[in-house]
Image: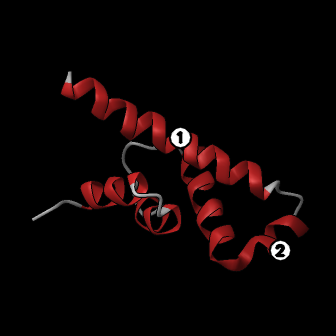
Amino acid sequence: MRTKTEKAVKLFQSGCLKEALAIFRTFRIGFTKEERRTLKIAHECLSGNAGFYQQLGVDTNAEIEKSRILLSRKYLYMNKLNKV
């Protein structure tokens, strides 16, 4: 049986950011409060609620990119180090 983390990483690696964020945004351990906020906003923006956050003055494209970088650093980079 695969773990939630393994499923989310596999989705992220295959380019399914929205689906990966749906899983990652539920994680409480391993992310700071600010990182969890970024993941939540990015997921909601990709789910069609970008207009709401834009009305609040949030740069939705920047939040999506921050989430992509965050996940890459935490999971893809770590996996490369573990395989070496």
- Coordinates of residue 15 in the picture (x, y in percent): 47, 58
Total labels: the figure holds 2
The residue that mark 1 highlights is: 70
Horizontal side of 58 relative to 42 (left or right) equals right
Horizontal placement of 75 versus 55: left or right? Answer: left
Residue 61: image quadrant is bottom right
In the rendered image, residue 19, in percent from the top left (x then y), is placed at: 45, 69
Helix, strand or loop status at disc 2: helix
Q: Are marks 2 and 1 in contact (CB under 8 Å)?
A: no
Question: On the image, numbered disc 2 is attached to which residue?
Answer: 51
Quadrant (top left/top right/bottom left/bottom right) for the C terminus: top left
Q: What's the mark number on residue 15?
A: none
Residue at 56% of width from left, 56% of height from top? 39
Left or right, 50 with reference to 4: right
Residue at 66% x, 54% y is 64
Q: Report the front residue among 11 and 30.
A: 11
Q: Secondary structure at mark 1?
A: helix
Q: Among all residues in the image, which is located at the extreme left? A: 1
Residue 65, percent from left and from top? 66, 47
Q: Residue furthest top?
A: 84
Who's the residue at 64% across and 69% down the image? 46
Amino acid type indicated by mark 1: Leu
Q: Amino acid at mark 2?
A: Gly
Label 2 or label 1, whichever comes before in sequence order = 2
Q: Residues within 10 Å of mark 1 (few under 14, many from 20)?
A: some
Observer-nearest residue: 35 or 46?
46
> Is 10 or 32 nearer to us in this picture?
10
Quarter in which the N terminus is drawn = bottom left
Q: Residue at x 36, y 48 (%)?
A: 29
Residue at the limit of the structure toward the bottom, as seen here: 48
Is 27 above or below relative to 72?
below
